[in-house]
Amino acid sequence: MPTALQPDKSILYTYYRQAEEEFIRLIQNCDLDSAIKLNPGLMTNFEDALSFALVDTYKNNNECGRAHLFLQRVLYYINRLKLFWFDDLENYANENSTVLFSIRKQIETEWMRWEL
């Protein structure tokens, strides 16, 4: 994310909202791990937003509420796959995805470091 976007919170809100929407589309793939192997660029924009949010939330102590909300919502979407909500079974196709496991681990690792 360009540094010119940092001061304008409305742009940050839009940036994280778009990244969250992209993440939702990604986890709706029938087989996310295979899709990423075939096209690694699918995750580029989301990974950029994730990295920026991790730095903004846990390293810079900017207390950007939208970055923190973005990270929490990503964790929610990942963890939701482990619970059965009586909806379409296709929603759970990626519950054991290594890509999603890696994202969750990345967020939780930074979160734990910040807590200490």
Image (cartoon, rainbow, N blue to C red):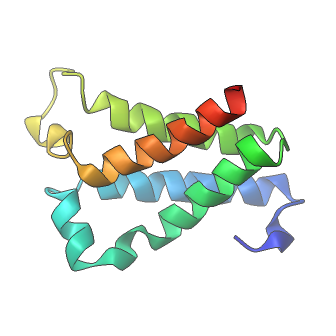
> 29 or 107, which is in the foreground?
107
- Identified at 81% across, 67% down, the residue is 5
Instruction: Using residue 66 as the reference point, say whether residue 109 is left or right of it.
Output: left
Instruction: Using residue 76 as the reference point, say whether residue 94 is left or right of it.
Output: left
- Identified at 59% across, 43% down, the residue is 70
Quarter occupied by the N terminus: bottom right
> 87 or 109, which is in the foreground?
109
Across and down, in percent, residue 116 comes to 70, 26
Across and down, in percent, residue 56 comes to 75, 50
Instruction: Using residue 110 as the reference point, say whether residue 66 is left or right of it.
Output: right
> 70 or 61, which is in the foreground?
61
- Identified at 45% across, 36% down, the residue is 75
Give the quarter of the image for residue 69.
Answer: top right
Give the quarter of the image for residue 30.
Answer: bottom left
- 113 to 85, vertically: above or below: below
- 88 to 103, vertically: above or below: above
- 115 to 102, vertically: above or below: above
Instruction: Using residue 16 as the reference point, say whether residue 64 is left or right of it.
Output: right
Query: Farthest left residue?
Result: 89
> 61 or 22, which is in the foreground?
61
- Identified at 43% across, 59% down, the residue is 22
Across and down, in percent, residue 37 comes to 22, 72
Number of marks in picture: 0
